[in-house]
Image (cartoon, helix red, strand yellow):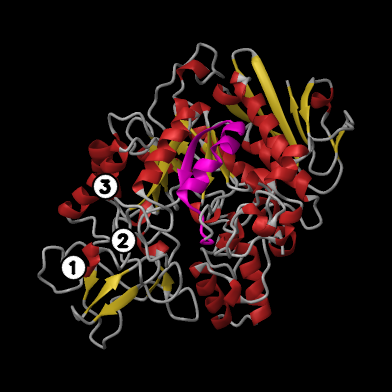
Amino acid sequence: MNRRDFIKSSLALTAVAWLDPMTLISKDSNIVVAAENLKWWQKSIVYQIYPKSFADTTGSGTGDLNGITAHLDHLKALGVGATWLTPIYPSPMVDNGYDIADYTGIDPSYGTMADFDRLVAEAKKRNIKIVMDLVYNHSSDQNKWFIESKSSRNNPKADWYIWRDGKANGEPPTNWRSIFGGSAWTYCKERDQYYLHTFAAAQPDLNWENPELRQALYDAANFWIDKGVGGFRVDAITYIKKPKNFVDGKPDGKDGMVGIHSMTANTPGILDFLHEFKSKVFDGHDIFTVGEANGVAPEELSQWVGSKGVFDMIFEFSHMNLPLKNGEIWCRPTEWKLTELKKALSDSQAVTKENGWCPVFFENHDQPRCVNHFIAKGADPIKAAKAISTVLLTLRGTPFIYEGQELGCTNVAWDSIDQYNDISSHGQFDFAIKEGFSKDQAMEFIHFFSRDNARTPMQWNNSKNAGFSNGTPWLPVNENYIKVNAAAEEKDPNSVLNWYKKLAKFRSKHQELIAGDYELLLPNSEEIFAFARNLNNKRMITVVNFSLNTVDLPKEFISKKILVDSEDKIDLNKLKPLEARIYG
């Protein structure tokens, strides 16, 4: 199922962030900064790896660190300068590593610390930095901190997590629903109290009000800096500050609960914690930081990034949440138009124009594949992938490519919820059933939104299991791997992979695509996404047809020089369906 069937719209994801102002503003008002004055990560491409699904060298069915090392040349060929790894720490894997049992170790399924050190060293030879994922809103319930905290009400770590007594009738302290479904509170008989978990019951929230807990987290981050990492992506950071008083919210479902996001996200006082985090970890190091800041609006960005901010960049989700305007409830998708997406993007670009920077992305480990998510049914998946990648690699900011995106990987549609590993998919399926949807309808929501769409094993070649593993993969391989795989696309000059390489090389040679400002063109078009990048007297224009119809081009484009086009046969006056073009 795709967006045309589901929410009848299309376009791509883009995220936005701010950074400390290091820019030199030119006398020319449309110049933001010369490329030579940018930091290394502003000129690079970042590649996100989901290690469990990338490459298995042991036959275990699970990807590992040595598998990443073995494919570093694949990343280098894409122009990648940094690789963000989702969590590789020891974990029970209830949420595939986002439930951390030890913040300074390596999960045995991924290898050893020696394997990690080798990965860092081999990546460095290729001018690639390793970026770690910090999960500091919550830990695993198997973390030794939590095991001690739950043992009694008066142990040294009793206050490292968030504990509350139940209501007089024995019910949980509030009616908050966790992001993965069900109550956000779980009872602990050892303490005769409930603990809070924004996500799964196996992911208890850490209590940032405790200074000893905060210092332990800072020490763990500094451990990895000493190991030579190039930065951090900080997970779910908008939830770390909780309200002073925990009260019931207005129910938003038949279960009588309210989503926890609306009750705790971006609570006042959160930035005080993050300024301390920055001063004790980030400052003074040649790294970059990206916060996952769901719920931060463009007008709030100056508090989070920039000269008075706490991160170099943040992923903000106003553009991503357009199809979920009613909250992150998959069975309540909302329609949106291309003009809404363009406005969301342009609003964020506007507030970063003078001293900001944007991480740009279309996919990540929590999202469907972009060719399904943002392009209408019946589209040629190769043309769709090329259209989206043209926006990705020419927008202002640092492009983030998610593993397999460079191949044009697509969603899966398994028959039963039992075939899905994603804990969120199971929670959303159960919620849809309780809301009155049939099992078939509930599965349509899962097919569209499931996080497993992005987590199927990487498709390296057309051999068994797509060359991912000699064993049984932890998650089934997408059946299209016979044609959609890196080895086949490497040999095909018209493949999605070679289009990515072409654009990455093109971007690296044109400073206006790295340092130029952003100017939205054709803002009222529901078919064409067009924008200019301006630097000094140079101007480059990207024009992409996101519709499945041939569209006429405005006269002002017709006389311009075409530098790149996704079609072999070009009509100067028109754009074919999903055609992408760059003018100079």
Q: Which mark is residue 399?
A: none
**Front-most of residues 536 and 368:** 368
Residue position marked by numbered label 1 in the rendering: 148
Mark positioned earlier in the residue sequence (2 or 3):
2
Image position, residue 481 (x, y; %): 71, 55
Q: Residues within 10 Å of mark 2 (few under 14, many from 20)?
A: many
> Label 3 neighbourhood size at 10 Å, few (<14), some (14-19), many (20+)?
some
Q: Amino acid at mark 1?
A: Glu
Count of numbered tags = 3
Is disc 1 placed on a helix, strand or loop?
Answer: helix
Q: For residue 6, what is the image quadrant?
A: bottom right
- Mark 1 and mark 2: span between their CA atoms? 13 Å
In the visual, does 492 lie left or right of 296?
A: right
Question: Image point 62% across, 65% down: which residue?
Answer: 476
Q: Determine whether 532 is above or below 449 in the image.
A: above
Residue drawn at (44%, 24%), measured in percent from left and top?
39
Q: Earlier in the sequence, mark 1 or mark 2?
A: 2
Q: Amino acid at mark 2?
A: Ala
Q: Which mark is residue 101?
A: 2
Q: Which residues are magenta?
A: 60-85
Amino acid under disc 3: Ala
User: Which residue is label 3 attached to?
Assistant: 220
Question: Can residue 233 be seen at all in this image of the molecule?
Answer: no
- In this view, the residue in front, 88 or 465, is 465
Q: Is residue 106 part of the magenta span, yes or no? A: no
Name the residue rendered at 14%, 74% in the picture.
Answer: 152
Q: Give the Cα separation between the discs numbered 2 and 3.
A: 12 Å
- Tell me the quarter of the picture where residue 574 sits: top right
- Mark sitting earlier along the chain (1/3): 1
Residue 94 place in picture, x, y as percent: 42, 68
What residue is at 54 percent from the left and 61 percent from the top? 61
- Marks 1 and 3, how far apart in space? 19 Å
